[in-house]
Image (cartoon, helix red, strand yellow):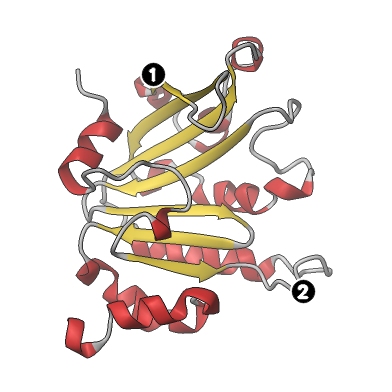
Amino acid sequence: MTNQVNAFLQSYFKDLELKPPLFYSWNYGLRFEIADPIKWNEKGGMSQAYERSTTLFNEVFAIDDNIIFVTDVHTFKSNKYLQKRPLNVYSKFIKSKQKLYQLSHQTLPELEEEDGVTHRFSLICNKSEIRYASLLKAICHEDMGDSQTILRGDRRIGYNIYLINDTKQIIYHLYDDRGCDIIAAGKRSLHAIYKNYNHWLLDYDREKMSSLFAPSNM
């Protein structure tokens, strides 16, 4: 049986390797600044990150869209973390326990490390089945070392979470509190988000995005 993530990528994002940074790996994408780089560590400074990440999620995903919730866990072949403590991302952020029986898993080579391995978990669901506000908040807190992080205990592992809109062919990747990449099979799917949230775009890459959506290119 063809893996659901591989089938999606082959159909709409051929030759794309699902790994960060997605914005630089695909022709049609947006890159947003999420947290205020000056105020993020002040009291209440993360409120901007919560607002922006959730707002963009709601722009990408409608209530009836099919979502592929992907979690890549990067570790060493010798690390038995997942055997001793099974991944709790889905049990924590998926509302229905019965839904967890549909969770898929595959093992991928971790190219950056000779002894590395990536465990890819994926689940087909919809927006109403995910505690997405809590999920996005946890991702924003990942580099802060507090109780709201995704993976706790073993710091030798890392992860990436991708939320894929199978209906609209869009991939949403909030990589941490700093930023969020949104890529699509075609740029027209991103035009409204680009226009409505232009003031949130990362200035460093603004020229590239402005060129993509220039009137002459539409």
Q: Nearer the viewer, mark 2 or mark 1?
A: 2
Q: Position of residue 30 (x, y in %)?
A: 40, 68
Q: Nearer the viewer, residue 115 or 78?
A: 115
Give the amino acid at mark 1.
Tyr
Element at label 1: helix
Measured along the vertical axis of the image, is residue 14 above or below residue 57? Answer: above
Q: Nearer the viewer, residue 79 or 134?
A: 79
Left or right of 94 on screen, residue 170: left
Q: Using residue 110 as the reference point, say whether residue 191 is left or right of it.
A: left
Residue that badge 1 annotates: 101
The residue located at (40%, 20%) in the rendering is 105
Tell me which corner region of the image, top left, top right, bottom left or bottom right, holds residue 61.
bottom left
**Residue 39, numbered label:** 2
Residue 12 in the image: above or below residue 206 = above
Q: Are marks 2 and 1 in contact (CB under 8 Å)?
A: no
Q: Nearer the viewer, residue 143 or 210?
A: 210
- Classify residue 198 by image quadrant: bottom left
